[in-house]
Image (cartoon, helix red, strand yellow):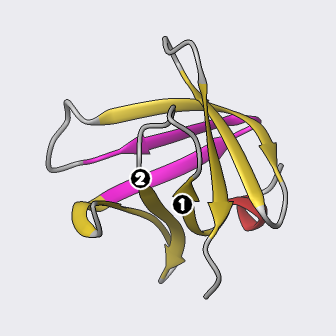
Amino acid sequence: MTEKSLAGSWERVSRAGAFEQMELAVEDGRRVFHSWLHERPEITDGQWSLKGCRLEVRVPSEPALSYTFTVMAADGKRLILREAGEPGAGRYRRIAP
C-alpha cells in the first residue's frame, strides 16, 4: 500500500462508505482531502495520512470531523475502505481524470 496508489479521485459504488466522492491529493507537498456530496463540496480543507494500512482523514477547521479507515484493498481502479466502528466496507472506483 502506497500513497501513490491512493492518490486520485474516487466515487463510491456501494451503500456503505463515508463519502459519495472524494479526492486524496498531494499539493505542494501537503496531503489534501476533498469530498463531495450530491456533486457539491462537502469537505474542502481536509488532510490525510497513510500509516501502513491505516488511512486517517482530519479536518483542522472542524476537529470533530476525523475519520480512520483500514484500507482493505487498493489498486489502480478500486479502493475498499472499512471505517473504524462501522460494519460494512465502502467500495470506491477511480474517477477517470
Q: Residue at x 41, y 52 (%)?
A: 20
Q: Residues within 10 Å of mark 1 (few under 14, many from 20)?
A: many
Residue 55 inside the magenta-drawn segment: yes
Q: Secondary structure at mark 2?
A: loop
Tell me whether the residue at label 2 lies in contact with that at label 1, contact meaning CB atoms closer than 8 angstroms. yes
Residue 70 quadrant:
top right
Q: Position of residue 92 (x, y in %)?
A: 63, 52
Helix, strand or loop for the magenta stretch, by majority: strand
Residue 34 inside the magenta-drawn segment: no
**Relative to 23, 79 lies left or right:** right
Q: Residue at x 15, y 50 (%)?
A: 61
Q: Is residue 34 above or below residue 89?
A: below
Q: Residues within 10 Å of mark 2 (few under 14, many from 20)?
A: many
Q: CA distance from mark 2 to mark 1?
A: 6 Å
Q: Is residue 88 above or below residue 29?
A: above
Q: Secondary structure at mark 1?
A: strand
> Which residue was labeled with disc 2?
20
Q: Position of residue 5 (x, y in %)?
A: 78, 63
> Which residue was labeled with disc 1?
11
Q: What is the magenta range? A: 46-59
